[in-house]
Amino acid sequence: MQRRNSLLAWGMILAFCAGAGAFYDVALAGKNRPLLGAAFGVFIGAPMIAFPRALFETRFGLRLRRLPFPLYAPLSLAIYVTMLVVSTVLCSAFFWAVGEIKGSFREAVLMSREDLLYSLVVLGIILLVLRIRDLVGGQALGSLLTGRYHKPVSEERVFLFVDVVGSTQFAERFGDLRAQEYLARFFETLTDPVRRHEGAVEDYVGDLAIITWPLQRGVEDARCVRCVFALKKRIEQETQAWQSLFGATPNFRAALHGGPVVTAEIGVDRHKITYFGDTVNTTARLEGLCRALDEPILISAELLARIPALPCELQARSLGSQDLRGRDHPIGVVALAPRPPSSADADAGGDRGVLAIP
């Protein structure tokens, strides 16, 4: 699903680049070569968008994004202009070499001010849309544009609440500004596991992140559970970096639950997709239960029963029925944890699909 959505997004971007290239060649440049213009748009636009976005996901990109805006704006603009010029020169050289562009090599690769300005305008439009997508989330943007939730919709979803442990103590020790950097880094670390497991970060509330999946997608291949332990593994792998930057490595509590919700678009000046129902409230109560039971990762027995298979490297331990504030009936709760290495190795050759709850 995530790959299909990514391919669809790229297809729309490339189609826009092709249309912009054809429009410029015919309507503005007056050369009447729409196919060549479209080819220019694609071959220049694709690397112009892909490379800088990949660059900004690196450590250099993360440092760049943390710079004050007066420094960030000109540096990022310089990167885009450099990429634009290089892409245009390479593309022009290719079409000159195959005979599609006549004249001297210098005339072929020379980029006019009009070409540069038009390319920057088109690039700016694409980056603006991508930035909006980053701010509200790809799934949420698609739902807002299509009007899927203009009227409330009843559906089933999985919710994951991830709460950073000890953020208050960190703030008392290092100050609020440093604590905010600490939380921002944690949420950046969370992004990749959520994307890889096809979830969506719906909201941040203080030191709490709310992630959701449509229920079928979340339980398939145990994506919602794998996401939690992928985050845990990544933090463990980056312990040295955390200690170097902050003098502390974050811990978190996580709670998983799923079921029916009512999803609706709300707001006037600022639109937002939100969820109503007992499922959301129960997930929040489960996250609070993590603290009471001293268990870092909890999942409701209801949701666990709907997951076809758990990875053999995980183990589940039933905590019985627990009373949650605001619920008339107790709920079955299960603690999840990595299986000891010896047990995981012993099960590696067997069925990964069945994990009994003792």
Image: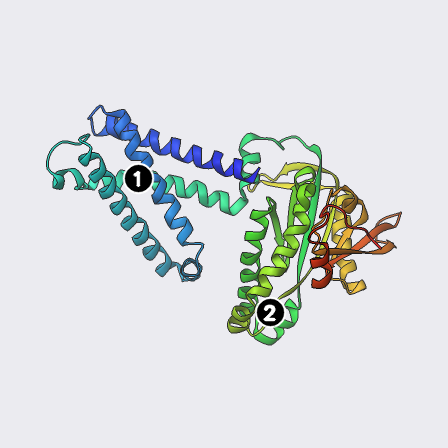
Residue at screen point 56% across, 42% down: 270
Residue 177 position within the rendered picture, expressed as x and y whole percent measured from the top left: 53, 68
Q: Residues within 10 Å of mark 2 (few under 14, many from 20)?
A: some
**Residue where numbered disc 2 is placed:** 249
Q: The N terminus lies in which quarter of the figure? A: top right
Q: Which mark, residue 44?
A: 1
Q: Which colour scheme is used?
A: rainbow
Between residue 103 and residue 131, name the one nearer to us. 103
Q: Earlier in the sequence, mark 2 or mark 1?
A: 1
- Residue flagged by tag 1: what amino acid is it? Ile
Seen in the image, is 101 located left or right of residue 41? left
Is residue 340 in view? no
Does 317 sit left or right of 74 as displayed?
A: right
Question: Callout 1 environment at 10 Å: few (<14), some (14 to 19), or many (20+)?
Answer: many
Q: Say whether residue 316 is visible.
A: yes
Where on the picture, by quarter, is residue 102? top left
Distance from disc 2 to disc 1, alpha carbons, whole Å, reads 42 Å
